[in-house]
Image: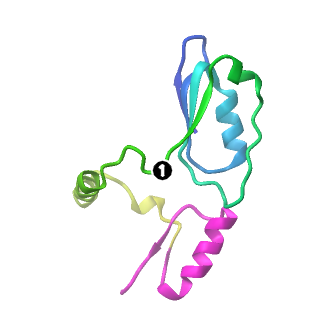
Amino acid sequence: MAAVRGLIGGAAYAFEAPGREETVQQAWASLDVRGQLLLVGLLPGGARITLGAGPFVSGQSVKGCYFESAGLHRDIPLLVGDYLRGELALDELITRRITLEQLEEAFDDLRAGLGARSVLVFCR
């Protein structure tokens, strides 16, 4: 979770990335008046989140994000260039490399919240 300091000491914006209810609740509790929680992480399918209703009275809000502001045709080539120049560290984010035969197992792990990132490798 990342946060940006607000007016009264809470967060003006909190970004939840792990996709876990406990970190969603921590981010929600960190908000300042009119603060906004952005859910970036994908929660497991069918997950439900319970949030205290009190902060809504002070204008806090929750918003989901899924490639919302990305211009894929513009951003992906820029990110690939950054990676190839060594300016974007992605290898450290990979939990494991998988083959096509391991794809269903990797999806099961993703749904169970295990591991951060699996990368499909077509040839070695």
Relative image position of residue 55 (x, y in whole percent): 71, 22
Please state if 12 lies on the left or on the right of 76 as rendered.
right
Percent of width and height locating residue 1 = 58, 39
Residue identifier under label 1: 66
Label 1, secondary structure: give it.
Answer: loop
Give residue 25's quadrant in the image.
Answer: top right
Looking at the image, which residue is at 48% across and 65% down?
A: 94
Q: Is residue 99 left or right of residue 1?
A: left
Please name the amino acid that badge 1 sits on: Tyr
Total marks placed: 1
Q: Residue 90: within the magenta?
A: no
Toward which corner of the image does residue 14 lie, by quadrant? Answer: top right
Q: Position of residue 12 (x, y in %)?
A: 54, 22
**Is residue 32 rendered to the left or right of residue 70?**
right
Q: Which residues are magenta?
A: 97-124
Residue at 39%, 58% (x, y): give it. Answer: 90
- Dot 1, crowdedness within 10 Å: few (<14), some or many (≥20)? few
In this picture, is 75 found above or below 57?
A: below
120 within the magenta span: yes
Q: Is residue 83 above or below residue 16?
A: below
Q: Measuring 62% from the left and 19% from the top, which residue is drawn there?
A: 59
Query: On the rendered structure, is 10 left or right of 53?
Result: left
- Quadrant assignment for the C terminus: bottom left
Nearest the eye: 67 or 93: 67
